[in-house]
Amino acid sequence: MRPEPHISEFNRPIVEEFRANGGRVGGLFEGGDLLLLTTVGAKSGREHTTPLGYVRDGDRLLVVASAGGSPRHPAWYHNLLEHPMVEVEVGTETFGAIAVPAEGAERDRLFEEIVRVAPGYADYQVGVERRLPVVALERSFTEAGPDEIANLADKLVEIHRWLRDQLRRVRAEADAYFAEREAGDVRPVGLNLQLRQHCLAFCESLHFHHTGEDAQLLPEMERRHPHLRAAIGRLRAEHRTVDRIRGELERLLADVTTAHPDRFRAELDRMTGELEAHLDFEEESLIPVLAAIPFPPGPPGV
């Protein structure tokens, strides 16, 4: 069981009222659109939950790092720059999201849309020298319906599909980013943070997936199915290899504006090849056994 996220004493009554009333609150937020954003602390690694106003933009939710007109960015903004994978609560729904700050003309366009809905943000911007960040919250993982996920094999395939799709997206954004940079734009507007956030989100998700398998799924499979020990040993070794490449990719992202395009692409290609082979082998090895285990699991002893 994960620890409860930290909530400031000021925000706690708002969060409690939100959860008790299906996302509706009174006071300053009455009548407005409110969500709860849970981020992972950039330094502490501890989860923090913050209530924020939001504006819809298609499938995305937009939030502004206004901090009530403070001259400094709020802590939750620094957190999502370090850990793009966040949790969002809207009404009675909770889902994972990737937090992507907008840049350049796109940021300005979105801020104008937000001000049309919530004019108060314009007042905040006038009162501070910093440019208020606009952050798009993109659903990170659209889970299949109950008719599609009947067992652990289905769930594994679903997770693998998301990892493959995310990796393809990172590659497409990297190609677009470096094409503009090679054309003479030292810092292509609109792609730097987008590429960085999606790439970090992929790296975090991959690390979480493999850590969970190593700690829970694989030991249990090894205990119940001794004939899989050799395959599980290979999977563990591949996890270490993929994790090393992931670390190298994250180091390249430390300053993507100066990353060498050929080296970055080579690392991404190497990771793609090894990850695809790993996922294929994992599915080939484990799906026949996982297909017999219902998902979600029933009560203990059932």
Image (spheres, rainbow, N blue to C red):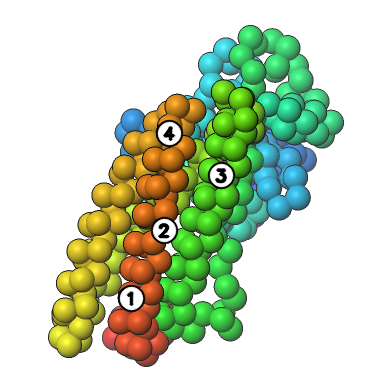
As measured in the structure, the alpha-carbon distance from the residue carrying label 4 to the one carrying label 2 is 18 Å
Disc 4 target residue: 260
Whole-angstrom CA distance, mark 1 to mark 2, is: 14 Å
Question: Are there few (<14), some (14-19), or many (20+) residues within 10 Å of tag 4?
Answer: few
At 45% across and 68% down in the image, what residue appears?
160
Specify the amino acid type for callout 1.
Phe
Q: Which residue has dot 3 on it?
A: 175
Residue type, mark 2 in image: Thr
The disc, 1 or 2, on the residue closer to the chain's N-terminal end is: 2
Q: Dot 1, how many residues are within 10 Å of its Cα: few (below 14), some (14-19), or many (20+)? A: some
Q: CA distance from mark 3 to mark 2?
A: 14 Å
Query: What kind of residue is marked 4?
Result: His
In space, the residues marked 1 and 4 are separated at their CA atoms by 32 Å
Q: Earlier in the sequence, mark 1 or mark 4?
A: 4
Q: Residues within 10 Å of mark 3 (few under 14, many from 20)?
A: some
The picture quadrant where one finds residue 263 is: top left
Q: Position of residue 156 (x, y in %)?
A: 42, 73
Residue on which disc 1 sits? 281
Residue 223: x, y in percent? 16, 81
* Tag of residue 96: none
As rendered, which of 146 and 13 lies closer to the eye? Answer: 146
User: Left or right: where does residue 269 sit relative to residue 212?
Assistant: right
- The residue at 52%/50% (across/down) is 171
Q: Position of residue 130 (x, y in %)?
A: 61, 14
For marks 4 and 3, the one nearer the N-term is 3
Q: In the rendered structure, are the residues bearing label 4 and label 3 in contact, judged by CB atoms less than 8 Å apart?
A: no
